[in-house]
Amino acid sequence: MAGVVTLVLDALKGSAAVLIAKTVTGSDWLIAAAAIAVLVGHIIPVWLGFRGGKGVATGAGVFLVLAPVALLCAGVIFLAIVISTRYVSLGSIIAAATIPLFVWLQSDSQPLLIAAVVGALLIVFAHRGNIGRLAHGTESQI
């Protein structure tokens, strides 16, 4: 139950940052900056010794607002990977990596595409330990 609450709150944090930027500025570049900032703040928070979360739920909240169809497509890929491999981390990494592709296919917004690329890179970076464990066959499955 605590995991579900955390997931929802992290997603709300990502959505709120983008919605506030949209409301206050209306600038695509500042909205993209807010999207990146909320992910950086989640993954490498200063007040937690630069050790935060993986950014997946926060990123989902960001792209729920910015590119819901891209998020839906990545979500389908996430589920397919997790169901077929039983690795949540692998599903998260691959889904995050596909967001820029889906954004590029569905939008001509350069700021949104940059936010998607930087966001995907941040999430993959946050999973570097998981990537090592996947490569060595020691990653936990569900």
Image: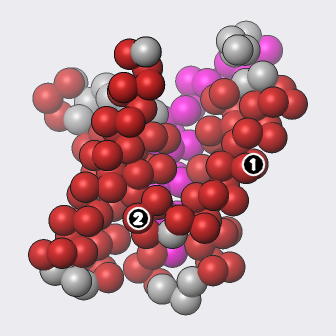
Amino acid, disc 1: Ile
* Secondary structure predominantly adopted by residues drawn in magenta: helix
Query: Which label lies toward us, 2 or 1?
Result: 2
Image quadrant where residue 99 sits: bottom right
Q: Residue at x 60, y 50 (%)?
A: 96
Residue 128 in the image, given as x and y percentages of width and height: 56, 31
Image quadrant where residue 7 sits: top left
* Residue at mark 2 to residue at mark 1: CA–CA distance: 19 Å
Q: Earlier in the sequence, mark 2 or mark 1?
A: 2
In the rendered image, the vertical position of residue 64 relative to residue 21, given as above or below? above
Q: Badge 1 local density, few (<14 within 10 Å), some, or many (20+)? A: some
Q: Residue at x 36, y 26 (%)?
A: 5
In the rendered image, the vertical position of residue 115 relative to residue 76, given as above or below? below
Looking at the rendering, in which quadrant would you find the N terminus?
A: top left
Q: Which mark is residue 47?
A: none
Query: Residue 71 lies in magenta, yes or no?
Result: no
Looking at the rendering, in which quadrant would you find the C terminus?
A: top right
Image quadrant where residue 106 sits: bottom right
Q: Badge 2 local density, few (<14 within 10 Å), some, or many (20+)? A: some
Asked whether the viewer can see residue 114, the reply is no
Residue 115 in the image, given as x and y percentages of width and height: 43, 67
In the rendered image, the vertical position of residue 128 relative to residue 34, given as above or below? above
In magenta, the rendered stretch is: 113-137
Q: Which mark is residue 65?
A: 2
Please state if 40 lies on the left or on the right of 122 as rendered: left
Asked whether the viewer can see residue 124, the reply is yes
Label 1 sits on a secondary structure element that is helix
Q: Residue furthest bottom?
A: 108
Amino acid, disc 2: Val
Label 1, on which residue? Answer: 77
Q: Residue at x 69, y 59 (%)?
A: 73
Label 2 sits on a secondary structure element that is helix
